[in-house]
Image (cartoon, rainbow, N blue to C red):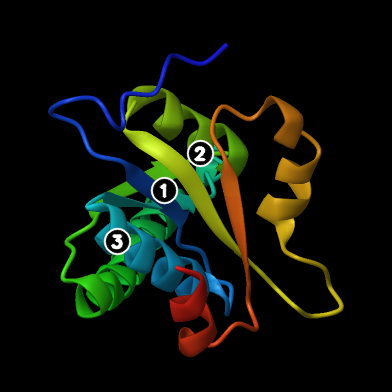
Amino acid sequence: MSAQRRSYESGHKPKYLVVVDDSAEWDRAVYYASRRAIRVGGGIVMLRVVEPEDRNQEWLGIAEVIRAEAYEGADAALDRASGRANGIAAITPERIIREGDPLEQILDVIEKDLDISMLVLAASGGPEGPGPIITTLAKTAGNFPIPVTIVPGTLTDDAIDALS
């Protein structure tokens, strides 16, 4: 069982966790979370998960270069997402880069920050399905430690404004 959330206790503020990935929809989650955060006086935590590289000793030098490039790409993605959140709500998000399984990393970030009160994800409207994180999360949603908001990737800024 997860620890009790502290989001609304004195000295704390609610935070929305947003996963910034390579999908076309990530912006919808950032937009929604930014609008909600400004409405409730909260903050945003942005998470980018990079896939671990195979550490075969024979190719260790190449693996390290690939890993460094993945972290540079993650940092650039978080720069874009942070800039977007700042432009929407004048919020400077916390930024986290993790390596490993996305769902495991999401759960670990939630466990370590008791102010995170909601996970915000955006879903693809395409025929390929909502996306791998949402598909995986749907199987464990009943045991998830915080509420999850899934923003349809097709919503416009005006539609999200009306909802948030």
Q: Which mark is residue 39?
A: 3
Count neighbours of disc 1 (C-alpha within 10 A) and say few if under 14, some if 14 to 19, many if 20 or more.
many
Residue 151 position, x and y percent, is 60, 66
Residue 76 position, x and y percent, is 30, 71
Residue 47 position, x and y percent, is 40, 51
**What amino acid does circle 1 point to?**
Leu
Q: Earlier in the sequence, mark 1 or mark 3?
A: 1
Front disc: 1 or 3? 3
Q: Residue furthest right?
A: 127
State how far apart marks 1 and 3 are (Cα): 16 Å
**What amino acid does circle 2 point to?**
Ile
Residue 41 visible? The answer is yes
Task: Name the residue: 50% across, 47% down.
Answer: 119
Label 1: which residue? 17
State how far apart marks 2 and 3 are (Cα): 24 Å
Label 2: which residue? 106
Task: Name the residue: 24% across, 25% down.
Answer: 9
Residue 73 position, x and y percent, is 37, 67
User: Looking at the rendering, which quadrant does residue 121 occupy?
Assistant: bottom right
Front disc: 2 or 3? 3
108 lies above or below 81:
above
